[in-house]
Amino acid sequence: MSCRRSEDLSKPTIPKFVESIATTVRAQSGSADVEAVVLRAVARRSESIDLPDVLELRSLLDVDGAQVDTLEEQVATIISAIDAELAGWDRQEVAA
């Protein structure tokens, strides 16, 4: 884990961010891996998440997209899961 601090993914810009990612997923003709698209977008937005972090996050995320009604809700759920995982990393680094 090279991530040094969790990203504040709950900033007021989140609705626009979620909408942007949902638009990207829709543009990929339904064959898009929503988790992968969200992870790429979060990594691009972040100053502290690098490729090893993205790969580790990808292996750790367990989001059930069937539990949500819209693509936007699925994207928001994935972002919340990423945020929670990064917060856990921060706690581990502080304890170390």
Image (cartoon, rainbow, N blue to C red):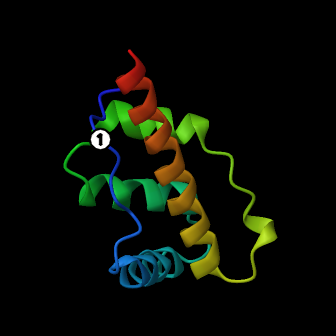
Say if 15 sits above or below 44 in the image.
below
Q: Which quadrant does the N terminus fall into?
A: top left
Q: Which quadrant does the C terminus fall into?
A: top left
Say if 32 sits above or below 72 in the image.
above
Answer left or right for 62 relative to 21: right
**Count of numbered labels shown in the rendering:** 1
Give the residue type that dot 1 points to: Arg
Answer left or right for 74 relative to 89: right
Looking at the picture, how far across and down is residue 36, in whole percent?
50, 54
Could you tell me if residue 33 is visible in this image? no
Query: At x 50% / y 79%, what residue is drawn?
Result: 22
Q: Residues within 10 Å of mark 1 (few under 14, many from 20)?
A: some
Q: Nearer the viewer, residue 93 or 19?
A: 93
Q: Residue furthest front?
A: 95
Could you tell me if residue 58 is visible in this image? yes
Q: Residue furthest top?
A: 96
In what element is the residue under mark 1? loop
Say if 19 sits above or below 5 in the image.
below
Query: At x 44% / y 25%, what residue is drawn?
Result: 92
State which quadrant residue 90 falls in. top left
Q: Residue furthest left?
A: 47
Answer left or right for 52 relative to 70: left
Query: At x 19% / y 49%, what residue is drawn?
Result: 47
Query: At x 29% / y 41%, what residue is drawn?
Result: 5
Looking at the picture, how far across and down is residue 57, in whole percent?
49, 39
What residue is disc 1 on? 5
Looking at the picture, how far across and down is residue 72, in whole percent?
57, 80
